[in-house]
Amino acid sequence: MNPTLAKSAPVAIPVSLRPLLEFPRIATLRSRRIKRALDLSITAVLTLAALPLIALISLAILLESGRPVFFRHQRVGRAGRSFFLWKFRTMVLDGDEVLARHLANDPEAAEEWAANRKLRHDPRVTRIGRLLRRTSLDELPQFLNILRGEMSLAGPRPIVEAEIGKYGPAWPLYSLTKPGLTGLWQVSGRNDTSYRRRIELDAAYVRNWTWTGDLQLLARTVKVVLSGRGAY
């Protein structure tokens, strides 16, 4: 044996390249099939049970602010594929104009928006919308996204294309699976966490996925929704 080779230290892999070399359990075909089976079976039951509530919420939105009842927004899914995420509409119809005026007149709100793309006291949100957001019921229409195979019950946060660059070296991990209706971010403070922490939680979910872990996340989500912590 060459003594030089025997004494040489292992080659260090730069931190920025490690996500590119990872192949977590969630990326295997068997794991994806298990996850999909759980998504379909649980979501089908939940959708049937939620139909009366969906009808009641739709009526409430119609009575308060008219059509449309639903809102869709383009997000990024597995492997960078785009899809339309569905929610109940929780904002006024002229939301863009209302937001622009509010940010122009409130420097603190403008700073909060620049940092998180969210406002704790958003002037665009309707009365029904505030209730739906606090209870996370605005996300019930995402059952359709799950049944269509665009989302999963549990997974990373659904992000927009402009956020891909912010994920940096964590993006290859994020793109290995579908975004989730719930996930580590949703049970770890939600909007009370920093953006950097959100990325760390998404990466941790992908690295450590198990199907039993998904079931535990669903159970934890129920507790978080009932508390309303971090929802606005």
Image (tube, rainbow, N blue to C red):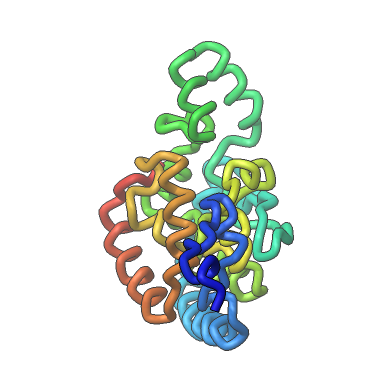
Counting from the top left corner in percent of width and height, residue 100 is at 61, 21
Assign the N terminus to one quadrant of the image: bottom right
The answer to whether residue 18 shows anywhere in this view is yes
Counting from the top left corner in percent of width and height, residue 107 is at 48, 13
Q: Residue at x 40, y 59 (%)?
A: 184
Assign the C terminus to one quadrant of the image: top left
Vertical position of residue 106 compared to residue 75: above or below? above
The answer to whether residue 87 shows anywhere in this view is no
Residue nearest the observer in this picture, 169 or 50? 169
Counting from the top left corner in percent of width and height, residue 127 is at 44, 39
Q: Residue at x 45, y 42 (%)?
A: 196
Residue nearest the observer in this picture, 150 or 175? 175
Q: Is residue 210 left or right of residue 94?
A: left
Vertical position of residue 82 compared to residue 42: above or below? above
Vertical position of residue 231 compared to residue 24: above or below? above
Residue nearest the observer in this picture, 119 or 46? 119
Residue 76 sits in which quadrant? bottom right
Residue nearest the observer in this picture, 112 or 147? 112
Numbered marks: total: 0
Q: Is residue 35 left or right of residue 134?
A: right
Q: Residue at x 54, y 26 (%)?
A: 114
Counting from the top left corner in percent of width and height, residue 175 is at 63, 62
